[in-house]
Structures are given as C-alpha cells and as structure tokens.
C-alpha cells in the first residue's frame, strides 16, 4: 500500500459499547472509541503525510526551482540593441524568444525610433531583426522577427490567473551590461485602470528588483511561464516595478508581413525640447531623463511631452523608464 494514504473510511456502528458509552463509535480492540478522537488523529497524520508526500491525491507540483527555471528559460532571454543611423547604438534592452522560428517579444519603447535592431542570444549568436510582426506604442509591445530556426523558447502563461503574493522572477540585462541577470520577488499588487480610453487596462506590480535595461524582459511564474513583460519602475520609492500582462501582448503575436524599422525614422528636433529636463512618451506612459538611453531620441519623437520635473511627470501618471 502506498505510504501516502489520503482517505480512511472506517465502518461505523450505533450502539452501546463495552465501556458504557452510546452513540456512533469505531471498533478498537473490543472497546469503541469516539470517532471525533480518531478523526483528529487521522487529520493530524494526514497533514504530516501531505507535508512529506506533496499535494493531495499524489498530484505532482508544477512549480520549479529558480535554478531550474533559469537553466531552462534563461536560454531564451535575449539582449536587444536599438541602432540609429549608421548603426549607432541608441539603447539596449531585453526581450525573449516565444517561437522557435525567430519570434521575439519586447517593449515597444526598447526599439522605438530604431533604424535597425540586433538580437543576441545567451549562447553568443547574434541576429539582425527583419522587422516587426506586431506592435503597439500605447500598450508598449513589440513583436520582432529574426531569421532563425530551432531557437529555445519561453512558454506563455495566463496573466488573468496571477494573484497578489505570487512568487515571480525576472531575467534581463540591467544597465545594458549585465546580461541574464536574475532577480525574484512577489506580485505586490494588480493595478487596474478604469479609464475607458486606456489600452493597458491592467499592470502587474512586482517587488523583484529591476533596473534600466530590464525593459522587455520576461516576468516568469514558478512554472517557468512568461506572465508579463517587464515595463517600468518608479524610482521615488523602493521595489515599485511594473510589468505589462502577457495576455495584453498575445494579440500582437501573429503571422504576416514584417514592418521595417526604418518606418520609425527620426524627424527634426521638436520645438522646446532642446533643454527639456524630463521627456514623457505619451504613447507608452513612461518618461525619460537626461543621460537615459532613450532621452535623446525622444527629443525627436512626436509622442514626446515635456515636464518640468520627475515629480511633475509622476503626477501626470507617467512612470520612469528603466532605460
């Protein structure tokens, strides 16, 4: 018999026993004992068996260790370099492969205003992206296509099922330098936007530490599934980080023609943005400061909004870019 016994169904009898008690009893060595006592003992042993033997009915847990997730899914986390005219690097972010034939997910602001984009895998292989399969600046999603086969991938989860307090991990390239950096934390809140005009109806707030350069990287549950795309951070506090739910990105994963990055060519410098202290992106809802990797190119973007300070941008509902 399996050592992990889950249910005990003893026979019961209603009578007066040899000990002078009446009611419902269980036989034990000729003297019945009250079932409440035995049930307590069975319940206590059951808890012990559950702790030792895993979930009830012998069902295996789907959760993995952080080490296992990194070993399996970390192979599919990529470094994305945004190139301007003359292949001049404009910024570095993160992304992850979602289909073995070269479909890559990232944030739109990572590749915004790019003339070209390169995608580098952890094994050292580097590809020049063909273009965009799908994108939306307001949702801050971009789906890239590279010419490749048999790539490692990260499975997609269901972000509608995430719960506050759930353990999560992130993998990315903080500061554009430290490739495949892993951090963990919990989902600290699910933030809902009741504005009918808002395209992002929900954001996942997390405590997992992230930095500039993590943008576009995967937010993973403990089954190794991507449930979000690391998106933004509020630096005025501690561990106030956000991810776009993966379900918001799924509609942009599609076959079809590839849109060239050159269609997002820079324009002329916008009036009043020559010395703007803080520039917000009205499409993505993030803001950039001087020294940030996307600050310069935002000075030429028609989505740019100038703020006097970071506090002013935050009051208007903008979040600081992680780049």
Image (spheres, helix red, strand yellow):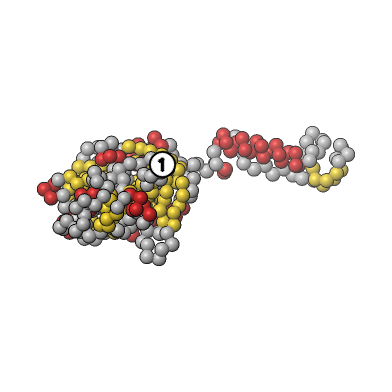
The residue nearer to you, when weighing 87 against 96, is 87
Q: Residue 195 is drawn in which quadrant? A: bottom left
Where residue 32 sits in the image (x, y, percent)? 81, 38
Q: Is residue 200 above or below residue 37?
A: below
123 left or right of 316 in image: left
Q: Residue shown at 76%/42% (left/top)? A: 35
21 left or right of 243 in image: right
Q: Residue shown at 28%/45% (left/top)? A: 323
Q: Residue shown at 21%/40% (left/top)? A: 125
The residue nearer to you, when weighing 226 against 309, is 309
Where residue 259 sits in the image (x, y, percent)? 20, 59
Where residue 266 sits in the image (x, y, percent)? 16, 56
Q: Which residue is mark 1?
A: 238
Q: Residue shown at 82%/35% (left/top)? A: 30
Residue 57 in view (yes/no): yes
The residue nearer to you, when weighing 235 against 86, is 235
- Under circle 1, the secondary element is loop
Q: Is residue 3 above or below residue 241?
A: above
């Amino acid at each position: 018999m399996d050592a992990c016994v889950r249910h005990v169904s003893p026979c019961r009898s209603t009578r007066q026993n040899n000990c002078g008690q009446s009611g419902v009893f269980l036989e034990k060595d000729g003297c019945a004992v009250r079932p409440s006592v035995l049930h307590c003992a069975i319940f206590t042993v059951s808890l012990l068996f559950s702790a030792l033997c895993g979930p009830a009915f012998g069902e295996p847990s789907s959760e993995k260790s952080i080490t296992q997730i990194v070993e399996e899914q970390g192979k599919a986390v990529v470094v994305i370099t945004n190139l301007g005219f003359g292949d001049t690097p404009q910024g570095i972010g993160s992304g992850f492969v979602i289909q073995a034939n070269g479909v890559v997910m990232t944030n739109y602001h990572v590749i915004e205003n790019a003339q070209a984009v390169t995608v580098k895998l952890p094994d050292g292989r580097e590809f020049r992206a063909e273009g965009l399969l799908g994108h939306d600046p307001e949702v801050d999603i971009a789906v890239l296509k590279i010419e490749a086969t048999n790539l490692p991938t990260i499975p997609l989860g269901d972000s509608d099922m995430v719960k506050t307090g759930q353990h999560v991990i992130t993998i990315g390239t903080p500061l554009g330098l430290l490739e495949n950096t892993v951090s963990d934390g919990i989902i600290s809140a699910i933030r809902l936007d009741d504005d009918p005009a808002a395209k992002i109806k929900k954001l996942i707030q997390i405590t997992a530490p992230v930095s500039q350069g993590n943008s576009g990287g995967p937010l993973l549950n403990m089954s190794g599934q991507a449930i979000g795309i690391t998106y933004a951070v509020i630096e005025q506090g501690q561990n106030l980080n956000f991810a776009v739910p993966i379900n918001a990105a799924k509609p942009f994963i599609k076959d079809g023609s590839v849109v060239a990055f050159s269609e997002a060519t820079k324009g002329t410098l916008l009036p009043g943005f020559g010395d703007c202290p803080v520039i917000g992106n009205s499409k993505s809802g993030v803001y950039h400061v001087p020294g940030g990797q996307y600050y310069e190119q935002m000075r030429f973007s028609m989505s740019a909004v100038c703020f006097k300070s970071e506090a002013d941008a935050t009051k208007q509902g903008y979040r600081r870019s992680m780049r």
